[in-house]
Image: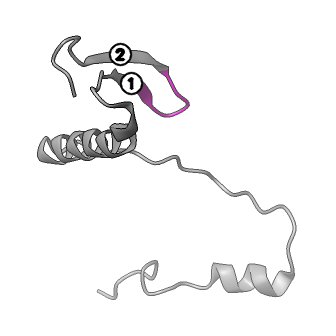
């Protein structure tokens, strides 16, 4: 990555559940761009981990409108993780 012009971080906008940034860099040899991009991404990831910044992943709710009654009954059965502890 060249120092001149220096790397430029740009805020590109608001995503559905994200803040979208882009980092613009200049390199000496075009044929090295895949390797360099990977190294930059890994460095960014390491910096985020060091700063204890987690990347959120999209979450989706699933609404089941119709299903076989036996499946519905099985879904309502408590599991070890949802069963209330005995006191």
Q: Position of residue 73 (x, y in %)?
A: 73, 84
Q: Is residue 46 left or right of residue 34?
A: left
Could you tell me how far apart the alpha carbons at marks 1 and 2 are, in whole angstroms?
A: 6 Å
- Checking the image for residue 10, the label placed there is 2
State which quadrant residue 75 falls in. bottom right
Q: Position of residue 41 (x, y in %)?
A: 30, 42
Q: What residue is rendered at 34% in x and 88% in y?
A: 86
Q: Position of residue 1 (x, y in %)?
A: 22, 28
Circle 2 crowding by C-alpha within 10 Å: few under 14, some 14–19, many from 20: few
21 lies above or below 8? below
User: Is 17 covered by the magenta stretch?
Assistant: yes
- Checking the image for residue 21, the label placed there is 1
Q: What residue is rendered at 26% in x and 38% in y?
A: 40
Q: Earlier in the sequence, mark 1 or mark 2?
A: 2
* Element class at badge 2: strand
**Dots 1 and 2: beta carbons under 8 Å?**
yes
Total label count? 2
Q: Which residues are magenta?
A: 14-21
Circle 1 crowding by C-alpha within 10 Å: few under 14, some 14–19, many from 20: few
Tell me the quarter of the image containing the C terminus: bottom left
Q: What residue is rendered at 40% in x and 45% in y?
A: 56
Q: Nearer the viewer, residue 68 or 13?
A: 13
* Element class at badge 1: strand
């Amino acid at each position: 990555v060249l120092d001149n012009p220096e790397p430029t971080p740009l805020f590109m906008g608001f995503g559905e559940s994200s803040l979208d940034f882009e980092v613009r860099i200049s390199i000496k040899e075009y044929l090295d761009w895949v390797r360099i991009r990977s190294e930059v991404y890994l460095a960014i990831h390491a910096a985020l981990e060091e700063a204890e910044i987690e990347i959120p992943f999209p979450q989706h709710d699933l609404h089941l409108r119709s299903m076989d009654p036996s499946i519905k009954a099985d879904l309502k059965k408590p599991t070890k993780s949802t069963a209330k502890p005995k006191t």
